[in-house]
Amino acid sequence: MMKRIFALLLTAALLLGLNACSAKEEEAVSVQSVSMLMGLGNAGENSRFSGVVTSGKTESIKKEEAMDIREIFVEVGQDVKAGDLLFTYDNAAFLLSLEQQRLELEGMRNTITATQEQIAELEAQREKVSDDNKLQYTLQIDTLSATLRETEYNIAVKEKELALKEADAARTEVCAGVTGRVTEINPDGGYDNYGNEKSFMTIIETGNLRIKGIINELNVSALYESCPVVIYSRSTSDVWTGTITMIDWGNPVQDNNYYYYDSAGGEMGTSSKYPFYVQLDSEEGLFIGQHVYIEAGYPAPETVEVRLAASFICDLESAPFVWARGKDGKLEKRSVTLGERDEWSDEYVIATGLSLEDYVAFPQEGLKAGMATVEWDESMFSGAGMTDDTMNYGGEEGYYDDGGLYMDDTVLETPEEEYAE
């Protein structure tokens, strides 16, 4: 509703002469987008965020520390299926270690038996001495009983550890848990740039893609969880849709804070960036590592009825037409076919002749075909589409392009860095 009101205010501005356009002066004619006049907004309103296509699931396989690798059957870049053999362990040394632990466990059990025998013997002796001498036997019995309980606890812990390790020893073959691509093998271990221990092997699941983007805390109101989004290809006209499933506030992007100028405080401040994830409605045409643009909202429906206020339509009774911007950017007289009229809003359905992407001029004296046109939209105003959430603060990696689109052109990780997460 507010968008429709804003569009009407722009039209009113034209009527008041803010467009300063007339045939006598031969100046450019101000034109407005049909989309904005319908209250659907225009390109200047939404922020775009950079995104990268990633896998929906990553399998990170850690190596058993006490076991050596016997053989690796895959290499980086190889596609595997769930259940395929990845590598095998040489568990000879591990089995020796297990045998040593079994011996330790047996020794602990023998200690239990010996302690119980000692306690029984002390209790028997205590019954034979005088009451004055019973106390020293009681103290010895209590000490041995405490030792007995501690040993019993240690045995229970040791038995659980041994059971887990015996299961590991039997698992000499490691197979893929997902169908995907091997993206990382680290036989020598090590740590990533953030100090996290690297996995021995990483597999990125294929056939279950999602989009990862980055949002800044200064424009957090532009997106929210469950928010519908449109995904645009950077190189083609392809468009996809999806929904934001998570904004990961708990994991700010490492080493990606930037400074901005705080006009209220008159000083520099810092701002953090956070990853968010988009679940796709369709994956067709996308591939892992592909970089895209993400914009909040729905794509303009192809079947939406184009409506236009009667005040924009000339010659309503006989041969209705509008003054529209042509493909060459010049004003043209364009015939339209009218549908039903909404009496309350005094708008007509435009059956043919106009689309949401077209720009039209408000009829006035002196208009003629071939006149130059200039867009008069929300993006023409310094405040329109440039809120505190999307303003290009100093240091922000974003900009407004020639079409008025705000581009948060954050540089995301390369596919290799993304896989390593």
Image (cartoon, rainbow, N blue to C red):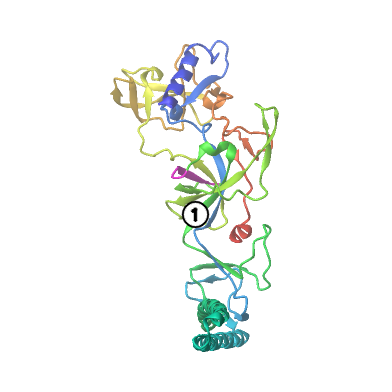
Q: Position of residue 6 (x, y in %)?
A: 46, 22
Segment tinted magenta in the rendering = 225-233
Tell me: 161 left or right of 187: left
Circle 1 — which element? strand
Along the line of sight, which residue is nearer the eye, 312 or 145?
A: 145
The secondary structure making up most of the magenta span is strand
Along the line of sight, which residue is nearer the eye, 365 or 257?
A: 257
Callout 1 environment at 10 Å: few (<14), some (14 to 19), or many (20+)?
many
Q: Position of residue 77 (x, y in %)?
A: 59, 68
Quadrant placement of the N terminus = top left
Along the line of sight, which residue is nearer the eye, 93 or 215?
A: 93
Q: Is residue 231 magenta?
A: yes
Q: Position of residue 43 (x, y in %)?
A: 51, 33
Residue flagged by tag 1: what amino acid is it?
Arg
Q: Position of residue 369 (x, y in %)?
A: 49, 21
Q: Tell me: residue 241, above or below residue 192.
A: above
Q: Is residue 289 magenta?
A: no
Along the line of sight, which residue is nearer the eye, 273 or 319?
A: 273
Number of marks? 1
Q: Tell me: residue 311, above or below residue 270.
A: above
Q: Is residue 279 visible?
A: yes
- Tag 1 residue: 210
Q: Tell me: residue 388, above or below residue 111.
A: above
* Residue under the image location 46 percent in, 44 percent down: 225
